[in-house]
Image (tube, helix red, strand yellow):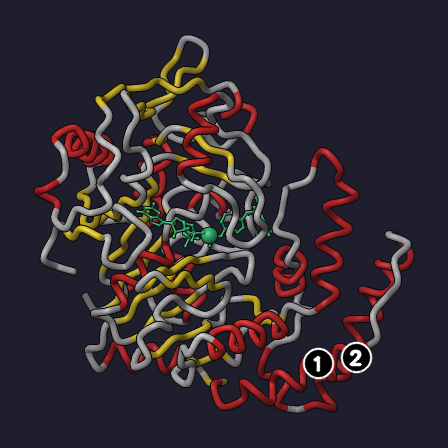
Amino acid sequence: MSATVIVGAQWGDEGKGKITDYLAEKADMVVRYQGGNNAGHTVVVKGHEYKLHLIPSGIFYPEKVCVIGNGVVLDLEVLDHELDYLLDQGVKTFNLKVSDRAHLLLPYHRRLDEVDEERKGKNRIGTTRRGIGPAYADKAARVGLRVCDLADPPSFREKLAAALAEKNRILERVYGQPGFEADEIAREAERVYARIRPFVTDTSLVINQAIDAGQKVLFEGAQGTLLDIDLGTYPYVTSSHPIAGGACIGAGVGPTRIDRVVGVMKSYTTRVGDGPFPTELSDDTGEWIRRRGAEYGTTTGRPRRCGWLDLVIVRYAVRTSGIGLLAVTRLDTLGGLDKVKVCTAYRRGNGTVTEFPASLDELAECEPIYEEVDGWPEDLDRLTSFEQLPQSARRYLSLVEDKTRTKIGLVSVGRERTQTLALTTTF
Ligand code: GDP
Ligand code: IMO
Ligand code: MG
């Protein structure tokens, strides 16, 4: 394993933080390549729960280099708090690197995200309201500010004033909201920049040099396949590329440098935010999964919508990211159910749909076709090897492998780093 991309195979919150932390033990470097603090990645080590939003999940090993790549939109205030939060808990952060090319997420992006969601009313996306969409929109419109701009404060202030003139006009005239003071934003950005300056570098160079030197690099995706702006359930998506290809752009590495893609798949499906969800359970079983799995958002605390595992989605993730191995999480959460259902295709009208559709209207007409398997006992969380898994749980995993034509390499049976069963010797 020299360069491995870790991607979410569903709608986010699959357990990427946990799997990244587990695999980081044998890696040298962990890189976030897209998204921002819309991500909430949970890592549990020796009973301690940590929630990360911007800093890669390799940070709990002091000797590993952790990189915030150029594809991330960086809210400096959030990074400042996250550094404080980690330092308070005794986690060392001196091995952090921050891309000089990452775009800044500034206070007006947050405000614009909020007012835009309010304006859309029932047509809202259900964003995390962290300013992600507006920050990426500015990047694409070529009016964004980058980390490297902060190296020259007078020039930074000039660029900020130009950007703000337009944003304030929109906030005041379209939304009837107060605008922002350039000086206040600049002072805060300069303060945090002074703190992170030692970490700021050309991270593409650092990552490529690590790969050249034979080091092991993990690329930690945020969000998930169906939240990808190109391949997800548009417009109910985020504004970046969570799929594996996003790692090349968002970290500045060529596709030829990537050796492997691991897809993180939850044993059922969840989604926060709005948009169609074929296997959603709006009944007692859905509520049972939400309660047993404590399915509430890491970033916003919103209840996650829950449903059965949808293998049409996972197959789509395998195809669009070139996933070679699956890491299955939360097998323990489904423990105790009599029967477990798995969607293997959809029915639409008189036809069968086996490939995830582009049109949301089509998706809304899709009814899941389920295969039912026997459930397994509640207490998988003490298991230490794959061989100890009950037969029924193994049959469930075989069904996933058969229907996705993809091997499972890891099975997670609890939140702790140690509650992870490795199936292949490659990890
Ligand atoms: P991420 O965004 O993909 O990193 O996932 P989140 O951290 O937002 O959500 C995953 C949640 O599931 C976290 O609370 C994890 O601690 C928890 N989790 C991960 N794997 C397992 C597992 O195998 N079993 C259980 N019970 N919880 C898990
Ligand atoms: P992790 O990395 C789950 C969802 C939001 C909303 C849509 C757009 O923890 O898996 P945005 O704020 O990005 O403009 O919101 O994307 N979303 C996530 N859902 N996990 C995440 O991250 C998410 N990040 C964004 O709920 O539906
Ligand atoms: Mg999350």
Q: Dot 2: within a 10 Å radius of its alpha carbon, few (fewer than 14), some, or many (20 or more) residues?
A: few
Q: Dot 1: within a 10 Å radius of its alpha carbon, few (fewer than 14), some, or many (20 or more) residues?
A: few
Position of the C terminus, as image quadrant, is bottom left
Q: Mark 1 and 2 residues: CB-CB less than 8 Å, in contact?
A: yes
Q: Residue 334 carries which label?
A: none
The amino acid type found where label 2 is placed reads Glu
Q: Could you tell me if residue 2 is visible in this image?
A: yes
The residue positioned 27% from the left and 19% from the top of the image is 371
- For label 1, being within 8 Å of ligand 2 is answered no
136 horizontally vs 316: left or right? right
Say how many tags the image has: 2
The amino acid type found where label 1 is placed reads Glu
The residue positioned 12% from the left and 45% from the top of the image is 386
- 244 or 43: which is nearer to us? 43
| 195 to 302, vertically: above or below | below
The residue positioned 88% from the left and 62% from the top of the image is 178
Give the residue at mark 1.
188
Q: Which residue is at the far top? A: 350
- 378 or 133: which is nearer to us? 378
| 259 to 149, vertically: above or below | above
Position of the N terminus, as image quadrant, is bottom left
Residue 252 lies in quadrant: bottom left
Give the residue at mark 2.
184
- 427 or 133: which is nearer to us? 427
Residue 203 lies in quadrant: bottom left
- Judged from the image, the secondary structure of the residue bearing numbered disc 2 is helix
Residue 185 in the image: state x and y as whole percent.
75, 77
- 99 or 388: which is nearer to us? 388
Residue 150 in the image: state x and y as whole percent.
64, 85
Residue 251 in the image: state x and y as whole percent.
41, 70
- Judged from the image, the secondary structure of the residue bearing numbered disc 1 is helix
